[in-house]
Image: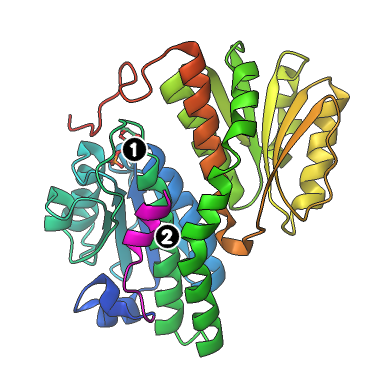
Amino acid sequence: QPRAIGDTLEGLASISPTLFGADARPIFEQTKRLLFLACGTSYYAGLAAKYWIEAIAGIPCDVEIASEYRYRVSVPDPDTLVVPISQSGETADTLAALRHARDELGMKNSLAICNVATSIMVNETRLHYITRAGVEIGVASTKAFTTQLAALYLLALTLAKTKGRLSSEAEDEALRRLRHIPAALQAVLALEPQVIAWAERFATKQHALFLGRGIHYPIALEGALKLKEISYIHAEAYPAGELKHGPLALVDREMPVVTVAPNDKLLEKLKSNMQEVRARGGELYVFADGDSSIEADERMHVIRLPENYGDLSPILHVVPLQLLAYHAALVRGTDVDKPRNLAKSVTV
Ligand code: F1P
């Protein structure tokens, strides 16, 4: 992971539209809306990007599940930048959604966030950012996801700069924090022994719930997907405030509840959701930050990430969730690299 992010951001000296292609500037200047199209893990990257782009660049975003998008009657907007996200660049549903947006809805401006420069997706889009996750041995996306997030954060900064919303101090600070991610990730990976201890307990469970709020809700979704994909434990993710609207009924002593709990402005609200879980006897597994006021006890286990990474925290917080799924799968003896019923790129 640290190397993949380092490679993806290699040589990054300043924020400029040319990072996305020689003719990106006029396209970015014209862009009034973004439409993310993706499947699976890449879709969750799009969900996270919406938080960044709307907050940093002030541009509204839609995020569509690519396998559904083309079956809906949607209203075309020529000033929309269509952004397909894909590790492989060959996913059939994402390509079909891209072509639908371009050929049937007339949205000609497109930007691929993709790990394979020679893919069909890159060939069919006007602008690109090539992530450099390297070859993923496993079928389930891991480095692809974190590098997509890094690229999408860069996109948020670039759009903000194009719209005159990024001061040079903010740019310098963002670049500094981006460059520091590999080192910060290395420190997160050092938490592995603690995650292994949790995974041993998880491996005997049939179900798990994942909770997050704000931009960490997509991270909870990705944590649940990883657990499903490689360990075959049934897992669902909810925005924590949604618990009381139904899913609380699932919580009992047998239900592990994984909570993504960075020390951000939503933490106090999240804590009251955690209290709802405790009141029903649920067992909480909390990924907190080093500086957050969450105390562990016998029904609330806490792993603390060393650094509170502010708005880039999703890139760090997803890694222990990936490790949890990986180690739960190892304990259960499933094939972590080749999960059943899953292909590296779904081309049909
Ligand atoms: C999308 C995806 C992956 C998943 C698996 C199947 O692929 O759903 O997220 O891990 O590999 O395909 P892509 O469009 O990002 O290549």
Report the residue at 25% width, 38% height from top: 93
Magenta-tinted stretch: 1-14
Is residue 124 visible in the rendered structure shown here? no
Q: Nearer the viewer, residue 33 or 145?
A: 145
Residue that carries the numbered disc 2 in the rendered image = 150
Q: How far apart are labels 1 and 2 at the CA level?
A: 26 Å
Residue 4 lies within the magenta run: yes
Quarter of the image holding residue 287?
Answer: top right
> For the residue marked with disc 1, what is the amino acid?
Glu
Give residue 177's position: percent from left, percent from top: 53, 69
Q: Quadrant of ligand 1?
A: top left
> For the residue marked with disc 2, what is the amino acid?
Ala
Is residue 37 visible in the rendered structure shown here? yes
Give residue 34's position: percent from left, percent from top: 38, 63
Residue that carries the numbered disc 1 in the rendered image = 68
First reached walking from the N terminus: tag 1 or tag 2? 1
